[in-house]
Amino acid sequence: MVLVLSLAAPLAGSAQISPGPLARPHERLEGSLQCVKCHVGGAGRGKEQMTGLCSSCHKEIAWLVERSRGLHGRVRQQRCAECHPDHAGKDFALISWPDCGAPDRFDHARAGWRLEGRHARQQCADCHKATFRVSQAARLSQRVAPYLGWVGLETRCTSCHEDAHRGDRTVVVAWGPRRSFVLAVMYGPVTMSL
């Protein structure tokens, strides 16, 4: 009986230290001496401070939140762990899609960029690729392939498209309804639909 209890004691002790393995993107934080990098303050108090600690590593997210940009800038009052829980195993997906079930059904209006026209017909990877990740958020990210995440795109047309106006912004007067723009040309305004 004593032998059985002594063999089971290490298993019970490890469950007290960690509720489970971290997801692969956080595996460098695995181990009992690493806990304080995410959890501080003792029992029950660590969750309140965790979001600040998340932001100290995920500087790209902190940058977006500070500027009220993207999805994270619009859910700034939530704790990170509400949407991104960990300790559920190496293959656990830290990015979940609770409202839509998959990234290709994500409502981009929630991130401040409503997909319309040709943008709505693109595949996620057509836009969310390294060449279009040009914002400061992308430069702050510590993520490495294949975990690049979804941040770093800009809403400026020229961040993805060639500048057909060659820097002459006086030509475009305003975007109109239904994805059209109004040009100020020598003979008066002209509306062009995309």
Image (cartoon, rainbow, N blue to C red):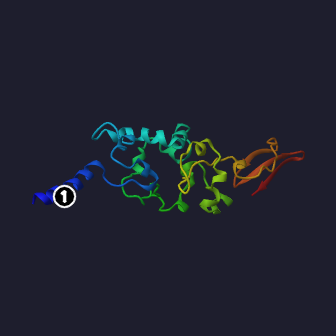
Name the residue furthest left. 1
Residue 101: percent from left, percent from top: 47, 62
Instruction: Name the foreground residue: 81 vs 17.
Output: 17
Residue 58: percent from left, percent from top: 50, 43
Q: Residue at x 36, y 53 (%)?
A: 87
Instruction: Name the foreground residue: 88 vs 44.
Output: 88
Q: Quadrant of the C terminus?
A: bottom right
Name the residue furthest front. 3
- Relative to 180, 85 lies left or right: left
- Relative to 109, 24 lies left or right: left
- Asked which secondary structure carries label 1, the reply is helix
Residue 140: percent from left, percent from top: 57, 42
How many residues crowd mark 1 within 10 Å: few (<14), some (14–19), many (20+)? few
Q: Tag 1: residue type?
A: Leu
Q: Residue at x 47, y 58 (%)?
A: 97
Question: Which residue position is annotated with label 1?
Answer: 7
Instruction: Name the foreground residue: 177 vs 105.
Output: 105
Answer above or below: position of 95 versus 140. below
- Relative to 146, 96 lies left or right: left
Residue 82: percent from left, percent from top: 39, 49
Instruction: Name the foreground residue: 20 vs 113.
Output: 20
Quarter of the figure with residue 127:
bottom right
| Number of marks in picture | 1
